[in-house]
Image: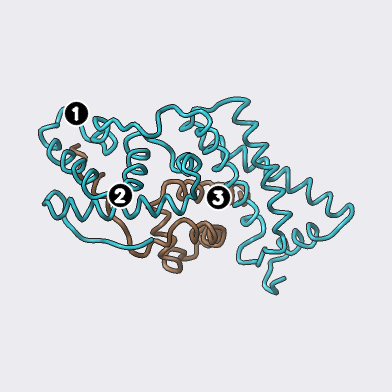
Chain colours: A brown, B cyan
Amino acid sequence: MNGRPALERFLRTDPRDVGCAQAMEMLHVYADLVASGAPAQQQYPGIAAHLQACGPCGEDYQGLLAAIHGDTR
Amino acid sequence: MPGGLDAESAGWVQALAGAGPGREAALVRLHAMLVGIARGEVARRGPRLRIAGPELDDLAYQAAADALVAITGKIGQFRGESRFTTWAYKFVIFEVSAKIGRHFWRHPAVALEAGDWDRLPGWFGADPARQAEWGDLFAALRRAVDAELTPRQREVFVAIVLNDVPLDTLVLHLGSSRNAIYQVLFAARRKLRAAMAASGYLCGDTVGHP
């Protein structure tokens, strides 16, 4: 590994990225759609872009999904 | 209350917005659910944290208690855009996040300001044995960090990339918000990409605004 692919990924920014505030505001709606199998990424591309790029928000999202799946098992 | 509310969510809202034994029973049940979610979440994150045992359990109970207060205070704001439980779980997940950030702020493992540039290639997974391939790349990145970033952008970049400070911990250290720090880092990434592309180290493409 020469580090270039990871550096490329880190520096790449998505113009659709809505930022933390909007993503967190709608996280429960987005997670419920994903858990129900609805095309959340297409409905909320800006949130999907953000959750891919932002470590802390992505972590919260994964936690919320895990909570939903635990709840519905 | 939105007409489209599912029956279970409507039951929660009615019980929590009401009074008497029905509300008390709903609070007890919700608290138990939140404790379960918080414990599950700290266990999920636990292996990557330097917290364990009773301290982790305390954190889960505090997160559940604080989430319960927030949920009961904001029950009037629930608009039925998701199931009630998903909305409620969001509060406890955020509380766990915030409390983990606070924990690292109180117990920093590394200095927040000093940056060890030798760690930069490793952060991006560069193999030390192949330094001939990446030496110029990371030297160019360091030059771009020094030349292109504002002091605030450099501070955030150094803390997160060189010192591995969790973003939520940096938020507390700088008295800022997650969104504000993310935007500083977003702008820094965009500038660095442009500089690296201009100097021929990366191909230039996407730019944007969060």
Residue type beneath disc 2: Thr
**Do labels 2 and 3 touch, CB within 8 Å?**
no
Kindly identify which residue carries mark 1.
Answer: B128
Determine the residue located farthest toward the top in the rendered image.
B53
Residue A24 or B108: which is nearer the viewer?
B108
Residue type beneath disc 3: Leu
Q: Is residue B97 left or right of residue B16?
A: left
Chain letter of the residue carrying label 2? B
Dot 2 and dot 1 within a common chain:
yes
Element under disc 2: loop
What is the quadrant of the C terminus of chain B in the image? bottom left
Determine the residue located farthest toward the front in the rendered image.
B151
Q: Is residue B95 left or right of residue A34?
A: right
Dot 3 and dot 1 within a common chain:
no
Residue B92 location (% of width, % of height): 62, 46
In the displayed structure, B187 sits above or below B101; it is below
In the displayed structure, B99 sits above or below B149; it is above
Q: CA distance from mark 3 to mark 1?
A: 38 Å
Q: Quadrant of residue B37?
A: top right
What is the quadrant of the N terminus of chain B in the image? bottom right
Residue B173 or B40: which is nearer the viewer?
B173
Residue type beneath disc 1: Pro
Q: Residues within 10 Å of mark 3 (few under 14, many from 20)?
A: many
Q: Residues within 10 Å of mark 1 (few under 14, many from 20)?
A: some
State which mark lies toward you, 2 or 3.
Answer: 2
Residue A7 location (% of width, % of height): 24, 45
Q: CA distance from mark 2 to mark 3?
A: 35 Å
Q: Residue at x 34, y 54 (%)?
A: B186
Element under disc 1: helix
Kindly identify which residue carries mark 3.
Answer: A64
Q: Earlier in the sequence, mark 2 or mark 1?
A: 1
Q: Which mark is residue B150?
A: 2
